[in-house]
Image: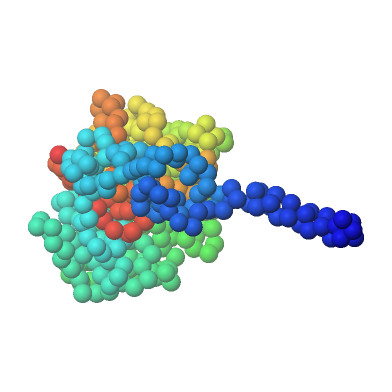
């Protein structure tokens, strides 16, 4: 007894330490993951669980109860797509429709080459600049790529194609510009202060801006494909950012310019080759992007406003000289006109983002990672339908459709590659 009485304090300290150790073990035990796979648990489920933080491992194992409850747990690397079957099997090509019918649709890679500024000419030929070797190529009738020229165009930042696909204005990063004729191998340098071009329907003339240092020397001009015979049309002064060179397919107009009415509206004026001023029309927003129908009878355009959360919205309006401003229609699609393509006068195909952050009209860069679906609009009967969800998530830029509307081509901004979807 004397021994225990003499060492009472020591025993109290030892007891306190043991008690603290037990409490600490009880507190930490739920947070410690098991070192070995519990008996009866399948390898796939255990591989998934063991990649989680230890606290989540313990929580899941407690929920499982009987081993095998989570049988068929998807692989942690699998990407879930709401339009794909919700099982643990890989999605196969057969699960996407081979022809666009409103759902998940198979896409075909047209070319491995990074395709910059592709175009479909008025003969249905598909051409583009390959950014790997800086050469232009065309897709022939058999689906083979044919070089348009041996010439290389390094550091290209913009290409403006002629409707016939045989000529283009090529602009490089240094601001140098030239007209190149792929048939004759002729190149025509253009003045550095000329910019923002559009070819005439016959591909022999161009309209553009001549931006002199002095605002009094800034003009809307036309010139021929040899770079000569330049003619001034109208002085644009300090308003060059409000002038849109765009030669209409019916040869009536060569440009448009806008004037603000209020925060949410602008007037659009049409300019003829000889300075004719046609009737104007009003558009409901800013950020005007126009696109002519193949006949020049109608104008598709996109604008943004406070009514659309500053996101782009698609409209169409009659634009022939005698009917300008008539039948203006809100298509209620949140996308840009540059993501659309006309076939004829009434069929429009557009890439439409699945969702857009507010303000995308003001800052289009915020939509660079959105995924796009494909829509068809019939302007004659007013129908509008989603025709395809590409089976590879794509941020689509150029949309091109064959004249018989059998195939739709598009560029995926994420890869720079060219893809196709069967429409029929």
- At x 39%, y 57%, the residue is 196
Quadrant in which residue 281 is drawn: top left
Tell me if I can see residue 270 in this picture: no
Place of residue 80 in the rendered image (x, y in percent of width and height, measured from the top left): 37, 44
Residue at the farthest front position:
1
Whole-percent x and y of residue 51? 46, 55
Q: Quadrant of residue 155?
A: bottom left
Query: Which color mode does the image show?
Result: rainbow
- Left or right of residue 14: residue 380: left
> What is the count of numbered marks?
0
**Rendering coords of residue 37 (x, y %):** 43, 53
Describe residue 117's horizontal placement relative to residue 361 as left or right.
Answer: left
Position of residue 166 relative to residue 410, above or below, is below
Query: Which residue is at the front of the view, 304 or 96?
Result: 96
- Is residue 139 rendered to the left or right of residue 38? left
Is the N terminus in the top left, top right, bottom left or bottom right quadrant? bottom right
Q: Is residue 347 above or below residue 148?
A: above
Q: Nearer the viewer, residue 402 or 274?
A: 402
Residue 99 in the image: state x and y as whole percent.
18, 40
- Which of these two is toward me, 323 or 299? 299
Q: Which residue is painted at 41% across and 60% down in the image?
A: 195
Q: Nearer the viewer, residue 247 or 389?
A: 389
Can residue 257 be seen in this snapshot?
yes
The residue under the point 29% across, 39% down is 85
**Which residue lies at the image location 86% right of the left edge and 60% below the top edge?**
3
- Residue lying at the far top of the rendered structure: 381
Name the quarter where the C terminus is drawn: top left
The image quarter containing residue 81 is top left
Residue furthest left as drawn: 142
């Amino acid at each position: 007894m004397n021994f225990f009485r003499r060492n009472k304090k020591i025993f109290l300290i030892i007891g306190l330490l043991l008690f603290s150790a037990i409490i600490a073990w009880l507190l930490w035990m739920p947070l410690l993951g098991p070192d070995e796979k519990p008996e009866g648990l399948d390898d796939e489920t255990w591989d998934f669980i063991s990649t989680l933080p230890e606290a989540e491992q313990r929580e899941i194992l407690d929920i499982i109860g009987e081993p095998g409850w989570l049988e068929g747990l998807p692989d942690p690397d699998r990407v879930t797509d709401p339009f794909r079957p919700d099982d643990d099997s890989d999605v196969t090509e057969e699960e996407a429709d081979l022809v666009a019918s409103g759902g998940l649709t198979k896409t075909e890679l047209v070319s491995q080459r990074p395709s910059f500024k592709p175009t479909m000419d008025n003969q249905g030929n598909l051409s583009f600049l390959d950014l790997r070797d800086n050469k232009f190529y065309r897709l022939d009738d058999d689906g083979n790529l044919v070089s348009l020229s041996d010439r290389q165009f390094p550091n290209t930042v913009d290409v403006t194609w002629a409707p016939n696909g045989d000529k283009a204005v090529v602009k490089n990063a240094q601001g140098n510009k030239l007209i190149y004729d792929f048939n004759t191998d002729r190149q025509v340098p253009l003045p550095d202060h000329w910019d923002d071009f559009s070819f005439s329907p016959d591909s022999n003339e161009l309209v553009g801006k001549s931006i002199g240092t002095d605002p009094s020397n800034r003009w809307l001009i036309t010139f021929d494909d040899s770079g000569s015979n330049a003619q001034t049309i109208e002085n644009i002064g300090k308003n060059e950012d409000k002038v849109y060179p765009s030669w209409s397919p019916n040869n009536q107009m060569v440009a448009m310019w806008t004037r603000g009415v209020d925060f949410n509206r602008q007037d659009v004026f049409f300019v003829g080759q000889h300075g004719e001023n046609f009737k104007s029309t009003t558009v409901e927003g800013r950020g005007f992007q126009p696109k002519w129908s193949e006949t020049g009878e109608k104008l598709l355009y996109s604008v943004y406003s406070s009514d659309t959360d500053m996101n782009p919205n698609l409209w169409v309006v009659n634009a022939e000289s005698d009917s300008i401003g008539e039948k203006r229609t809100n298509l209620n699609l949140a996308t840009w006109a540059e993501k659309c393509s006309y076939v004829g006068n009434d069929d429009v195909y557009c890439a439409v983002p699945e969702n857009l952050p507010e303000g995308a009209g003001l800052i289009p860069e915020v939509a660079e990672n959105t995924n796009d679906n494909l829509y068809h609009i019939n302007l004659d009967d007013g129908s509008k339908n989603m025709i395809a969800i590409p089976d590879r998530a794509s941020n689509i830029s150029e949309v091109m459709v064959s004249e018989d509307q059998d195939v739709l081509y598009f560029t995926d901004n994420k890869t720079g590659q060219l893809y196709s979807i069967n429409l029929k």
